[in-house]
Image: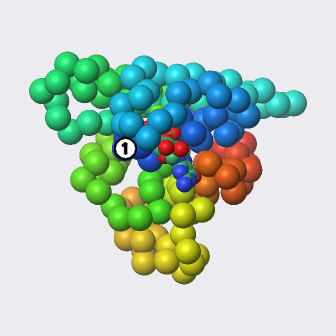
């Protein structure tokens, strides 16, 4: 079996960190600075009976006036063609206009969309997440919702199990 999974989300949400965590290596550049990932980064994880191809996409940018932004938006859109699964990565805090932009993009895909809520290591209290999750679940019909930390690795195995089960 072979699967093609796109990791999408606004700039700085942790897409490259997640890909590196899944692959167990520093394949994709991560940075506090947005726009570090400018191209599509592919990572392939091979297990006994499953090969998953992950695409780390550049974040989508609102300002279409800049050539670099247009280029990155195109790379992100291209990654959504022919995918088997989309991992939509959002932050543990508020929903932003940039998240909305990503949501609009992925609302057109026909494959399942898994919502991954990242950076939960920054939560003081797990219950802080609940009102945010309520807002998120109303946005779209997600196949699954996984709170996780790409940085610490917490719950990333659960996300991978979901990917493997699709
Ligand atoms: P991308 O633009 O979506 O690819 O985001 P990056 O993977 O480059 O990460 C952006 C910033 O968020 C970096 O400083 C990461 O170290 C940080 N980051 C990513 N995931 C987590 C996480 O789970 N917890 C915390 N605390 N920081 C994270
Ligand atoms: Mg990146």
Residue drawn 41% across the image and 29% down it: 36
Report if the beta carbon of the residue with label 1 is closer than 8 angstroms to ligand 1. yes
Q: Is residue 123 left or right of residue 52?
A: left
Residue drawn 46% across the image and 22% down it: 40
What colour scheme has been applied to the protein in the rendered image?
rainbow
Q: Say which of 8 and 127 sits in front.
A: 127
Q: Say which of 67 and 162 sits in front.
A: 67
Residue drawn 33% across the image and 51% down it: 99
The answer to which image quadrant residue 70 occupies is top left
The answer to which image quadrant residue 137 occupies is bottom left
Res. 41 in view = yes
Q: Residues within 10 Å of mark 1 (few under 14, many from 20)?
A: many
The local secondary structure at tag 1 comes to loop
Image location (x, y in percent) of residue 33: 39, 37
Farthest residue in the front direction?
32
Image location (x, y in percent) of residue 65: 12, 27
């Amino acid at each position: 079996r072979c699967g093609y999974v796109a990791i999408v989300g606004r700039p700085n949400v942790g897409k490259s960190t997640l890909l590196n965590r899944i692959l167990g290596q520093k394949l994709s550049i991560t940075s506090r600075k947005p726009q570090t990932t400018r191209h599509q980064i592919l990572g392939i994880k091979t297990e006994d009976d499953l090969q998953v191809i992950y695409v780390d996409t550049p974040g989508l940018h609102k300002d279409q006036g800049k050539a670099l932004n247009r280029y990155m938006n195109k790379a992100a859109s291209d990654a959504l063609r022919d995918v088997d699964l989309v991992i939509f990565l959002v932050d543990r805090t508020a929903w932003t206009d940039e998240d909305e932009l990503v949501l609009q993009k992925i609302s057109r895909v026909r494959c399942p969309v898994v919502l991954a809520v990242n950076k939960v290591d920054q939560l003081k209290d797990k219950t802080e997440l609940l009102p945010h999750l309520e807002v998120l679940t109303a946005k779209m019909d997600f196949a699954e919702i996984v709170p996780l930390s790409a940085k610490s690795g917490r719950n990333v195995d659960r996300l991978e199990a979901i990917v493997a089960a699709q």
